[in-house]
DNA sequence: CGTTATCTTGACGTACATCAAATGTCGTGG
DNA sequence: CCACGACATTTGATGTACGTCAAGATAACG
């Protein structure tokens, strides 16, 4: 199912964008938001649909403004590694060469702002702060990927789940409270492919955490963190 | 053993640097190399010594000009994940906050150019091409870390070793031939911590590859790739 | 030449994967 | 409203790739 283009610039474009504060767009001053809006196309991607594919020519950058997407790579035989989940404010499409190196699909309906590559290069020349912001973004992504390598290479299933739940609780809210009630829009299969485990192990480990009194699971996709400090200790790998 | 400072700028500074072509320094035009040299301090780091430590204030950037370093993160109980090996041309120290997020140690004696953070920020303003280069570097690092996540999350021991050997064979030489004779300066323990395995599994898997006629091991640290195509197929995860 | 670190090899254990089935959960249509 | 099938999640039984423990073998070193 292909993603659908809605409009090439709505009437109230970037100024009222809820994701702006958290995104690279905040490098462009309010007065110049028109320039930004002129370069973007808003797209709505239905759940399950892809909007960026590994290997395809990297013609666009994307900025998620609503919903959740999964970023992943596939091996030829179908094994999948999810590299992360993109939520509002997340910038996508940085590619070392001229082809995307990761794929992106909507987990739940997603809205993205799409920018043509040349337009971004032009904007970067006009607003040098934007390049600074992009470098900052890339650094953050890199640090996250390195943390991911530690998780995948050296943590146990229990530690991986604890890390995932806490990460999801704090994602987005930059320096804020860390939610205790989580909604997980992705399936157990997505979580498994993110943590380098199987669906069964994810399920079993979650019920183990529940039976240990660390979390509650009112529904499969709703998690309450009952003892965040204990989860944090597990996630950090403390004995 | 602490790293030792040699000189604050040698007589023939950056112009004769063998690592320049592969490093971010090539964003500075030849005529301005004096400005670059004035901002750098050359340090020699003996094998085994650390020169960057996770959690420390990120006061400097580093550019490896000789030798091999390991980049890693530790868990509190000592588990280690090596994120990669830095060879000449490798730029280090991009940190999202003001503290390093990874540690670096010399595997074999290393020479690095050290830049104070403020100096780099000043240079970036003077040479905008440098910021472009830094973004490019960060993108490459990110792609490498994402590839690392696939390796750690979804590949078998055999596939990990094949990936590692081919990666080492092509590292550095950007678009060039891919060596068939490899020298591995790092220990089996380093390889294990890079691939998310144990020393024993690394050793066993290497002898399995040798017995399968895919590689030769004249010495533990010398590898000859006998059938690179077959290794590539294994590394890619083809069945 | 001992001494010590590194690497290899073997025997055995285990955390997680695989296979299989039961149990929800939800949308669809009778 | 309820029967039905498709699908996601959970749970159980069993398998296995890799880890752990323990020797040797080999090489580096004073």
Image (cartoon, coloured by chain):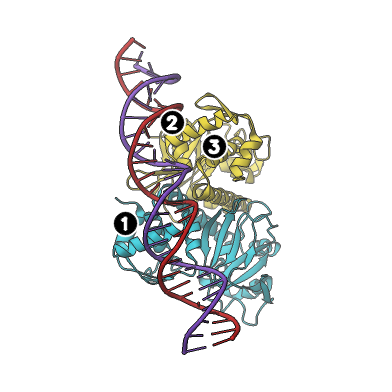
Chain colours: A cyan, B yellow, C red, D purple
Tell me how far mark 2 sits from mark 1, CA to CA. 34 Å
Residue B6 visible in image: no
B20 to the left or right of A208: right
Which mark is in front, 3 or 1? 1
Q: Residues within 10 Å of mark 1 (few under 14, many from 20)?
A: some
Q: Are marks 3 and 1 on the same chain?
A: no
Which residue is disc 1 drawn over?
Answer: A233
Q: Chain under label 3?
A: B
**Secondary element at image label 1:** helix
Q: CA distance from mark 2 to mark 3?
A: 14 Å
Circle 3 SS class: loop
- What label sits on residue B47 in the rendered view? 2
Does D30 sit above or below residue D12?
above
Binning the other alpha carbons within 10 Å of mark 2 as few (below 14), some (14 to 19) or many (20 upward) gives some
Q: Specify the subunit that label 1 lies on.
A: A
Task: Say which mark, if any, is on residue A162.
Answer: none
């Amino acid at each position: 199912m292909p993603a659908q283009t809605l409009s090439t610039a709505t009437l109230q474009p970037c100024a009222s964008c809820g994701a702006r504060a958290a995104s690279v767009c905040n490098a462009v001053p309010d007065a110049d938001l028109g320039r930004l809006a002129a370069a973007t196309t808003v797209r709505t991607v239905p759940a399950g649909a892809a909007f960026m594919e590994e290997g395809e020519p990297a013609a666009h950058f994307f900025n998620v403004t609503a919903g959740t997407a999964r970023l992943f790579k596939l091996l030829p035989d179908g094994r999948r590694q999810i590299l992360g989940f993109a939520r509002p404010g997340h910038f996508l499409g940085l590619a070392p060469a001229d082809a995307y190196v990761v794929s992106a699909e909507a987990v739940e309906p997603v809205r993205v702002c799409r920018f043509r590559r040349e337009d971004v290069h032009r904007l970067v020349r006009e607003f040098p702060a934007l390049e600074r912001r992009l470098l900052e973004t890339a650094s953050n992504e890199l640090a996250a990927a390195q943390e991911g390598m530690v998780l995948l290479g050296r943590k146990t299933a229990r530690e991986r789940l604890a890390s995932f739940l806490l990460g999801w609780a704090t994602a987005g809210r930059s320096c804020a409270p860390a939610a205790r009630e989580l909604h997980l829009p992705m399936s157990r299969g997505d979580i498994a492919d993110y943590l380098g485990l199987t669906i069964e192990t994810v399920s079993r480990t979650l019920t183990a955490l529940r039976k240990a009194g660390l979390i509650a699971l009112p529904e499969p996709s709703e998690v309450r963190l009952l003892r965040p400090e204990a989860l944090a200790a597990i996630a950090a790998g403390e004995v």
